[in-house]
Image: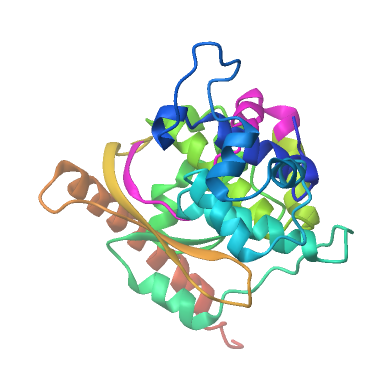
Amino acid sequence: MDQQPGSRGEIRHFLASRRAKITPAQVGLPTNARRRVAGLRREEVAVLAGVSTEWYTRLEKGHIGGVSEDVLDAVARALQLDDDERTYLFDLARSARLASRTPSRRRDVEVPPPVQWLLDSMTMSSAFIRNGRTDVVAGNALARALHAPMFDSATIDQRGRPNIARYVFLDPGARDFFVDWDAAGNATAALLRAEAGREPRDRALRELIGDLSTLSPEFRDLWAAHDVVIRHGGIKRLQHPDVGDLELTFRDLELPLSGRAVHNLITYTAEPGTASEDRLKLLASWAATKSQAVEPTRHSPQPGPP
């Protein structure tokens, strides 16, 4: 299994895995009972993309740096890549063109105060910001209450900041918190795969992927699948330790804070009139009460001299 983001192996395994998912019938090619592979052969992809077999074979071996966008687009169409997968392929090509191969540590971007004010104003929605490595870099009171098992997890970093991937794959309690743990695991691994295409020389990302690959068999299997997700949304079912079952709608919105660094605003809301809305309101009330209890202490005047 390739664990080095941005390497030729990643390009090779990604293209081969997409090729294996497409049957000849799906692209109008005759089906031969004597075929040794379930998916397309390299020469068939080459024909569909309008390039030579030798050229496509070289591409699938990882020689992607000098390939034009038109040719990459043709390959993406031939492999029936979705929008996220196509973006990932182009990110791999961009990364391959960069001269530097030395991993570096990206400086974390501080969340500007107005953005935190925005989060705090969303009193009936859980809202937090995650970066491409799935670090939770900011959140409102309801986010901390809703995701209390993650914020209280032993997987948080020295600054008390949760990482979604570490929680999902390394904290056994995540399987109780996420009712659909398999879906959460699939999406989380696919988000990291997308970030690996964007930032293959991010040392912290490489260390995270290395830790998860070493400690979690489930992550190793999902990482080997080479699935890619950039943004996602839908229904999330949670089993909260204080209020019980919650069925919430979540949205993932890109929030441009600095350059190419990825930051996404994640919101969780409940359908009006449902039991989940009542339980989310209860959590919001508890979170507000706790916040009010802390706030006077933080800003209370110091006693004067007697």
* Image quarter of residue 36: top right
- State yes or no: residue 236 in magenta: yes
Tell which of 219 and 241 is nearer to you. Answer: 219
Tell which of 304 and 66 is nearer to you. Answer: 66
Q: Residue furthest left?
A: 273
Against 46, residue 264 (above or below) is below
Q: Quadrant of the C terminus?
A: bottom right
Q: Left of 127 or right of it: where is 243?
A: left
Against 76, residue 61 (above or below) is above
| Rendered residue at 53%/73% (across/down) | 298
Q: Is residue 170 visible?
A: no
| Residue 264 screen position, x and y as percent | 49, 63
- State yes or no: residue 19 in magenta: no
| Residue 83 screen position, x and y as percent | 46, 55
Q: Which residues are magenta?
A: 213-238
| Residue 60 screen position, x and y as percent | 71, 42
